[in-house]
Amino acid sequence: MGKRETFSPFDAAEYLKTDEDMALYLDAMIEESNGDPRMITVALGDIARAKGMTQIAKATGLARENLYKALSADGNPEFSTVMKVITALGIKLHASPAVAVKSRKAPRKRSTRELAGA
């Protein structure tokens, strides 16, 4: 028999080195989540661990242990907790339409003669 390979569990936090990496990762997780809030929660947890959970706990005013629990796959954080974490991470949320909006033609300008009913 050959030598057995061992693998360590994948940890996304190890690969999140820059603020841009973190924002792109969260954006991708939101896109892929199909409305599953657990994916977004886990992504926030990964980013918080990459930045330093102690630092994020201090910035949010929440206990580090509570953050680990809330931002785990089994966590169910309140929206206020999510917003505190996002703020502490220095991430800005924005919204855009889910589907492309067709451009609307500007209404044709009417002459004063048309407006007067002539």
Image (tube, rainbow, N blue to C red):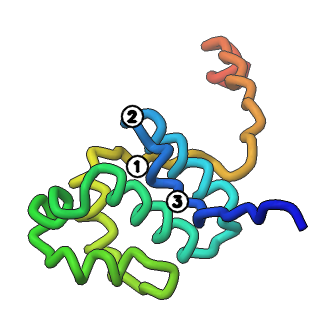
Mark 2 is on which residue type?
Thr
State which tag comes first along the sequence, 3 or 1. 3
Give the x, y percent position of residue 6.
67, 64
Mark on residue 18?
A: 2
- The answer to which image quadrant residue 76 occupies is bottom left
Q: Is residue 49 above or below residue 109?
A: below
Coordinates of residue 96 in the picture (x, y in percent): 57, 45
Labelled pair 3, 1 in contact (Cβ < 8 Å): no
Q: Left or right: 23 with respect to 32?
A: left
> Is residue 27 shown above or below 81?
above
Q: Which residue is mark 3?
A: 11
Of badges 3 and 1, nearer the viewer stands 3
Q: Nearer the viewer, residue 100 or 22?
A: 22
**Mark carried by residue 16:** none
Q: Mark 1 highlights which residue?
A: 93
Q: Residues within 10 Å of mark 3 (few under 14, many from 20)?
A: few
Secondary structure state at the residue bearing disc 3: loop
